[in-house]
Image (tube, rainbow, N blue to C red):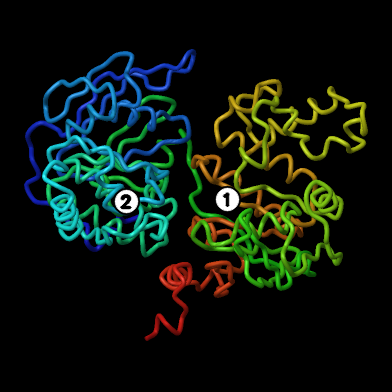
Amino acid sequence: MERVNHPDAQRPQGAAASAPAIELRAINKSFGPVHANRDIDLSVQKGTVHGIVGENGAGKSTLMSILYGFYTADSGDILVNGKTVSISNSSDALSLGIGMVHQHFMLVDNFTVLENVVLGAEGSALLGRSLSKARSELQRLARDYGLEVSPDTLIEDLSVGQQQRVEILKALYRGADILILDEPTGVLTPAEADHLFRVLATLRNEGKTIILITHKLREIMAITDAVSVMRQGRMVATVPTSETSPEALAELMVGRRVLLRVDKDEARPGDVKLAVENLTVADDAGVIRVKGVSFSVRAGEIVGIAGVAGNGQSELLEAIAGMRRPVAGRVIVNGHEVTTHGEAGAAELRQKGLAHVPEDRLRMGLVTNFEAWENSILGYQDEPRYGGGLALDIGASRREFEGRIAQYDIRPANPRLKTANFSGGNQQKIVLAREMERDPDILIVGQPTRGVDIGAIEFIHNQIVKMRDAGKAILLVSVELDEIRSLSDRILVIFDGEIVGEADPASADEGELGLLMAGVHNKEAAQ
């Protein structure tokens, strides 16, 4: 695969050939028996975008947390601009010109943009020059780096993409020359991601140094100058991006060849298995989040719902799964209207052939203090195969889960291990195995690969396609547009609680889908 550079991602000529912006030497960090970082060496050149990739548990977040002062290394040296430094906390990092934009934003919703930017810098010389001068500095930074956002707007009134701009402005306001970005496009529309790339290109061309942690190899190829690969706590390679490919990086990450595309035949849809009619759903605060939605899913097809997080997907799935009472409308499963909700509703749905992989495995899919085998029967513990009623057959339950461990490659292969001690990807496999192995007629899946590494993504995608080919009806919700496009046989786009468009994945244009996800309808886009 040829490298595709973002159109605005032009490299600065004659980047500094002096000391690297960041150099890590023989960094080690352990948490009890877990050796998270093993003799890590890393060199990041000034005025470049440097990517770091690796599977879950590879140690990349730990390494960046050491650089930003959240953790202290057990041994090793950190050099900033050629000088050995000590970083004990984030204040130390900021004083050295290192800023971090977290995956989950650190903003106060009911504060303005300006208040958030200066928050924590009250004692700095910059704020001492008065709030009006802080406002002027913020406006200058926003203008210079393409991060325009009104200083007086409340954070809660901004889009996710605009909130991310505020996070970057916070770091720049504090004088950051080195920016660490952790999975920055995970909650952005394609248009917002493109804008972020333009911002990163501008920052780099102004001499800033960017460290980008992402699992999206296409982004690595588009915007980075160099990429480092971590595996099992070690640094296994650092290469110029122009000399590698997504396939090569995936193999370095996993230690084997990985198929980066979803290999599936054309769908052969049958009868309607799931029908949603004029469904209206409110959230816990009584705000309507789903507004008169109607669609159907047939046997032998995957229907994907694309949209930016927070546009009603969660409430829609919860209503279909019997976890939330709709305000209006009907859910019809295998020809039967389901009218109950809560524990009884979820149980009725399981009996009628619907299985549910929730969006948030920790909040809705698992009890992390339970052992893995216990979670593997959660919600199905009254079935005769487990003894039924009060007499649970523990031996049969554990033996069944041992078979799933092998089938789903769950690691470590220990049914007695507390679920909290599994990685996110293996926790997801426990939930998927529990729901998929019930042989349901309908499977609804929310964010199937959220927080999952590239090897597990390949496996999960293959399992979903196998279920479709076995004649199951699959409803898939994901904020990952690439995932929706590659898995789905039909795509529905949701915005502000409404289905605003339908597309054929074979011909769907990413730009059009991105506009729909942002609430821009086809007629508006043509004007």
Q: Nearest the camera: 359 or 254?
A: 359
Residue 255: image location, x then y, percent: 46, 33
Question: Crowding near pointer 1: few (<14 within 10 Å), some, many (20+)?
Answer: some
Query: Helix or strand or loop: what does disc 2 sit on?
Result: helix
Vertical relation: 104 (above or below) 476: above
Query: What whole-number distance in Å separates the C-alpha atoms at marks 1 and 2?
Result: 24 Å
Q: Residue at x 72, y 32 (%)?
A: 375
- Mark 2, other Cα within 10 Å: few <14 / some 14–19 / many ≥20: many
Q: Amino acid at mark 1?
A: Gln
Residue with the mark numbered 2: 221
Residue located 45% across and 17% down the image: 31
Q: Quadrant of residue 305?
A: bottom right
Would residue 204 appear left or right of 257 to someone viewing this image? left
Q: Which quarter of the rendering shows the C terminus?
A: bottom left
The label on residue 190 is none
Answer above or below: position of 95 versus 291.
above
| Quadrant of the rendering where the N terminus is positioned | bottom left
What secondary structure is marked by label 1? loop
**Would you say 297 lies left or right of 425 here?**
right
Q: Is residue 185 above or below residue 278?
A: above
Q: Earlier in the sequence, mark 1 or mark 2?
A: 2
- The residue at 24%/41% (across/down) is 179
Residue at x 31%, y 32% (from the top left corner)? 237
Measured from the top left, where is residue 291 in percent x and y? Answer: 63, 70
Residue under label 1, please give it: 447
Q: In the displayed structure, does residue 498 sit left or right of residue 272?
A: left
Q: As shown in the figure, which amino acid type bears the numbered disc 2?
A: Met
The residue lying toward the viewer, choosing from 171 and 215, is 171
x and y percent of residue 499 in the render? 59, 72
Residue 310 in the image: state x and y as whole percent: 52, 57
Asked whether the viewer can see residue 119, the reply is yes
